[in-house]
Image: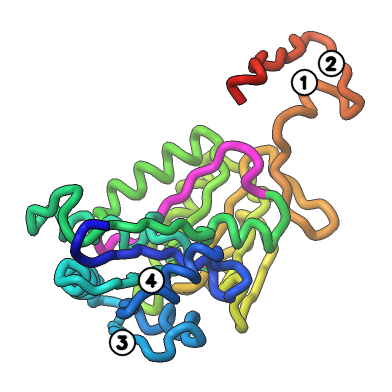
């Protein structure tokens, strides 16, 4: 292996160990230095014995990325931990910005090890049913780094094209206006009865799930740990679950017969040696 350090950028999933991948846990176990936001460090504290731990607050992200890169560049095996997937509103982007800033090239120290994790959209979806079975998108409502006009435009585009929408960073103590505005944009395109799920702290101790709809979800608590999943025009509630159909029901009967006016789909032929 090339001389130098390793920087693992590790998504640890929603919160509990069972939903972190074996690869994520191994990257943390192998690291000499573990860097992360306090809450995430706490989530993996059982793996940290004998390691140097660099904990930082929420607003110190760039410092966290810099110190992880510097330590790894100097030869250490460093794990930078992020909740969910580090590449989804996580630390992975900042790491690349820092690497670009210092003129890092492939083959230089540190070697990068990007480890995927279960992102909130997926963990939260599993808590409420099957809301993401058709086309969906994620939008972060945090306008700390992105102008609100850009965010509003994306909400409008997603709402008007009937995507299921997972809203990340919907609100915080001080930031409460964005979710109200997001609601009014989406409501222009969708019925008030459209299913909406609020999942707070999925797979964590204080997990809370609320099933509601577009006209009522703002009556409930929405905070920094909540993901809001807004259904599309076909999403429905079934036995307390939120379900977005795949779309098959309008083409086939459940027995597999083609409905009048529909063309049967053809499978792609794949030769065995290509599989
Ligand atoms: N990298 C993370 C997202 C970080 S942005 C990921 O891939 O999941 C922070 C936002 O993620 C929160 O405001 C919330 O909307 C969502 N989030 C993260 N963990 C969550 C959890 N356990 N339950 C519900 N939402 C979560």
Cβ(mark 3) to ligand 1 < 8 Å? no
Answer with left or right where residue 67 lies relative to residue 85. Answer: left
Marker disc for residue 24 = none
Question: How far is mark 3 from mark 1, CA to CA?
Answer: 57 Å
Task: Determine contact: label 4, label 1, CB under 8 Å.
Answer: no
Question: How far is mark 3 from mark 4, CA to CA?
Answer: 13 Å
Question: How far is mark 2 from mark 1, CA to CA?
Answer: 6 Å
Task: Determine contact: label 2, label 1, CB under 8 Å.
Answer: yes
On the image, the x and y values in percent for residue 225 come to: 49, 73
The color scheme shown is rainbow
The mark nearer the N terminus, 2 or 4, is 4
Marker disc for residue 259 = 2
Residue that numbered label 4 is attached to = 81
Q: Residue at x 49, y 35 (%)?
A: 160
User: Where does the magenta region start and end?
Assistant: 131-145
Residue 139 is one of the magenta-drawn residues:
yes
Residue that numbered label 1 is attached to = 251
Query: From this viewpoint, is residue 62 visible?
Result: no
Q: Residue at x 73, y 48 (%)?
A: 243
Marker disc for residue 52 = 3
Answer with left or right where residue 71 lies relative to residue 92. Answer: left
């Amino acid at each position: 292996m090339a001389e130098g350090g390793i920087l693992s950028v590790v998504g640890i999933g929603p919160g509990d160990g069972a939903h972190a991948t074996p690869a994520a846990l191994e990257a943390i176990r192998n690291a000499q230095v573990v860097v992360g936001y306090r809450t995430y460090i706490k989530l993996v504290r059982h793996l940290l014995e004998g390691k140097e731990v660099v904990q930082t607050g929420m607003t110190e992200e760039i410092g966290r990325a810099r110190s992880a890169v510097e330590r790894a560049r100097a030869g250490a095996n460093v794990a930078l931990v992020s909740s969910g997937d580090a590449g989804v509103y996580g630390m992975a982007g900042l790491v690349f910005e820092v690497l670009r800033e210092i003129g890092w090239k492939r083959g230089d120290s540190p070697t990068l090890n990007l480890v995927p994790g279960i992102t909130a959209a997926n963990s939260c979806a599993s808590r409420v049913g099957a809301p993401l079975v058709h086309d969906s998108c994620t939008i972060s409502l945090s306008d700390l780094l992105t102008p609100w006009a850009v965010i509003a435009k994306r909400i409008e585009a997603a709402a008007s094209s009937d995507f299921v929408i997972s809203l990340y960073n919907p609100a915080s103590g001080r930031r409460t206006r964005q979710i109200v505005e997001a609601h009014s944009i989406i409501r222009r395109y969708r019925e008030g009865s459209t299913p909406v799920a609020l999942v707070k702290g999925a797979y964590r101790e204080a997990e809370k799930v609320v099933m509601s709809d577009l006209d009522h979800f703002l009556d409930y608590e929405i905070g920094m740990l909540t993901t809001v999943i807004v259904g599309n025009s076909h999403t429905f509630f079934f036995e307390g679950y939120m379900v977005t159909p795949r779309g098959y029901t309008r083409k086939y009967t459940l027995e597999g017969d083609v409905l009048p006016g529909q063309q049967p789909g053809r499978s792609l032929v794949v030769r065995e040696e290509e599989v």
